Image (cartoon, helix red, strand yellow):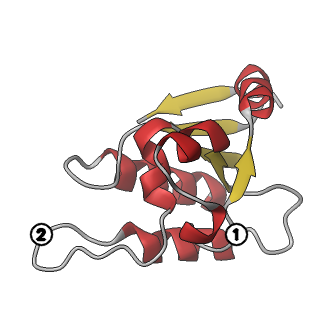
Amino acid sequence: MADSLLIIVRRGPYGTVNAAEALRHLNGSLAHGLPAQALMIDDGVYCAVANQKVDESEWVSLSKTMESTLALSQGRDQSLVLAHIPSLTARGLEVWDLVEGVRLIGEEEATRLLAEAGAVLIY
Protein backbone atom coordinates (compact mmCIF):
# COMPACT_ATOMS: atom_id res chain seq x y z
CA MET A 1 0.00 0.00 0.00
CA ALA A 2 1.71 3.18 -1.16
CA ASP A 3 0.51 5.38 1.69
CA SER A 4 1.29 2.92 4.48
CA LEU A 5 4.09 2.91 7.04
CA LEU A 6 5.89 -0.19 8.28
CA ILE A 7 7.90 0.30 11.46
CA ILE A 8 10.46 -2.43 12.00
CA VAL A 9 11.67 -2.86 15.58
CA ARG A 10 14.91 -4.87 15.73
CA ARG A 11 16.18 -3.86 19.17
CA GLY A 12 14.92 -4.86 22.58
CA PRO A 13 12.81 -2.60 24.77
CA TYR A 14 15.59 -1.43 27.11
CA GLY A 15 19.07 0.03 26.79
CA THR A 16 18.12 2.56 24.10
CA VAL A 17 15.06 4.66 23.29
CA ASN A 18 14.55 2.91 19.93
CA ALA A 19 11.62 0.69 20.91
CA ALA A 20 9.79 3.47 22.75
CA GLU A 21 10.31 5.80 19.77
CA ALA A 22 9.00 3.14 17.41
CA LEU A 23 5.77 2.84 19.41
CA ARG A 24 5.51 6.63 19.62
CA HIS A 25 5.78 6.86 15.82
CA LEU A 26 3.21 4.10 15.39
CA ASN A 27 0.73 5.89 17.65
CA GLY A 28 1.40 9.25 16.01
CA SER A 29 0.91 7.83 12.53
CA LEU A 30 -2.36 6.23 13.51
CA ALA A 31 -3.55 9.43 15.21
CA HIS A 32 -2.98 11.28 11.92
CA GLY A 33 -4.85 8.69 9.86
CA LEU A 34 -1.84 7.04 8.22
CA PRO A 35 -2.13 3.26 7.91
CA ALA A 36 0.78 1.89 9.95
CA GLN A 37 2.00 -1.36 11.45
CA ALA A 38 4.95 -2.35 13.62
CA LEU A 39 6.90 -5.52 12.95
CA MET A 40 8.86 -6.88 15.89
CA ILE A 41 11.83 -8.82 14.55
CA ASP A 42 15.18 -10.00 15.98
CA ASP A 43 15.48 -8.74 19.60
CA GLY A 44 12.52 -6.45 18.91
CA VAL A 45 10.21 -9.35 19.73
CA TYR A 46 11.05 -8.74 23.40
CA CYS A 47 9.06 -5.49 23.08
CA ALA A 48 5.89 -7.55 22.67
CA VAL A 49 6.42 -9.59 25.85
CA ALA A 50 3.59 -9.12 28.35
CA ASN A 51 4.07 -7.94 31.94
CA GLN A 52 7.54 -6.50 31.51
CA LYS A 53 9.18 -5.69 34.85
CA VAL A 54 11.55 -2.74 35.00
CA ASP A 55 11.80 -2.78 38.82
CA GLU A 56 14.04 0.03 40.09
CA SER A 57 15.47 0.99 36.70
CA GLU A 58 14.83 4.30 34.99
CA TRP A 59 13.13 2.52 32.06
CA VAL A 60 9.38 2.49 31.47
CA SER A 61 7.62 -0.82 30.85
CA LEU A 62 6.60 -0.95 27.20
CA SER A 63 4.06 -3.74 27.70
CA LYS A 64 1.44 -1.22 28.93
CA THR A 65 2.19 1.05 25.97
CA MET A 66 1.88 -1.96 23.68
CA GLU A 67 -1.51 -2.83 25.21
CA SER A 68 -2.75 0.73 24.64
CA THR A 69 -1.53 0.67 21.05
CA LEU A 70 -3.21 -2.66 20.41
CA ALA A 71 -6.48 -1.29 21.78
CA LEU A 72 -6.44 1.05 18.78
CA SER A 73 -6.65 -1.96 16.45
CA GLN A 74 -10.18 -2.79 17.56
CA GLY A 75 -12.39 -2.58 14.48
CA ARG A 76 -9.47 -2.25 12.06
CA ASP A 77 -8.93 -4.67 9.21
CA GLN A 78 -5.24 -5.16 10.01
CA SER A 79 -3.18 -5.94 13.08
CA LEU A 80 -1.11 -3.05 14.35
CA VAL A 81 1.67 -5.09 15.94
CA LEU A 82 3.20 -8.15 14.35
CA ALA A 83 5.82 -10.54 15.71
CA HIS A 84 8.20 -12.48 13.48
CA ILE A 85 7.85 -16.21 14.26
CA PRO A 86 11.49 -17.19 13.49
CA SER A 87 12.70 -14.40 15.83
CA LEU A 88 10.37 -15.59 18.60
CA THR A 89 11.49 -19.19 18.17
CA ALA A 90 15.18 -18.26 18.24
CA ARG A 91 14.63 -16.52 21.58
CA GLY A 92 12.54 -19.26 23.17
CA LEU A 93 9.36 -17.18 23.22
CA GLU A 94 5.85 -18.48 22.59
CA VAL A 95 2.60 -16.76 21.66
CA TRP A 96 1.39 -16.91 25.28
CA ASP A 97 4.44 -14.85 26.35
CA LEU A 98 3.19 -11.88 24.30
CA VAL A 99 0.76 -9.04 24.90
CA GLU A 100 -2.68 -10.12 23.77
CA GLY A 101 -3.43 -8.94 20.24
CA VAL A 102 0.06 -9.27 18.77
CA ARG A 103 -0.24 -11.27 15.55
CA LEU A 104 2.43 -13.78 14.56
CA ILE A 105 3.76 -13.79 11.01
CA GLY A 106 6.27 -15.84 9.09
CA GLU A 107 9.10 -14.91 6.80
CA GLU A 108 6.97 -14.80 3.65
CA GLU A 109 4.42 -12.36 5.09
CA ALA A 110 7.17 -10.19 6.59
CA THR A 111 8.81 -9.97 3.17
CA ARG A 112 5.49 -9.09 1.52
CA LEU A 113 4.78 -6.33 4.07
CA LEU A 114 8.21 -4.83 3.50
CA ALA A 115 7.79 -4.91 -0.28
CA GLU A 116 4.33 -3.31 -0.15
CA ALA A 117 5.03 -0.57 2.41
CA GLY A 118 5.03 2.99 1.20
CA ALA A 119 7.64 3.93 3.81
CA VAL A 120 9.74 1.98 6.28
CA LEU A 121 11.27 3.12 9.59
CA ILE A 122 13.80 0.81 11.23
CA TYR A 123 14.57 0.96 14.93
The quarter of the picture where residue 10 lies is top left
Residue picked out by circle 1: 101
Residue depicted at x 79% and y 75%: 74
Residue depicted at x 35% and y 48%: 12
Residue depicted at x 72% and y 51%: 104
Give the x, y percent position of residue 63: 44, 72
The quarter of the picture where residue 46 lies is bottom left
Q: Is residue 30 above or below residue 43?
A: below
Separation (CA) of disc 1 from disc 2: 27 Å
**Residue 72 horizontal side relative to residue 51, left or right:** right
Of the two numbered discs 1 and 2 on the same chain, state the one appearing first in sequence. 2
Density class for disc 2 (Cα within 10 Å; few <14, some 14-19, many ≥20) is few
Q: Is residue 34 above or below residue 10?
A: below
Amino acid at circle 2: Glu
* Residue 40 in view here: no
Looking at the image, which is closer to me, 65 or 97?
97
**Residue 57 horizontal side relative to residue 38, left or right:** left
Residue picked out by circle 2: 58
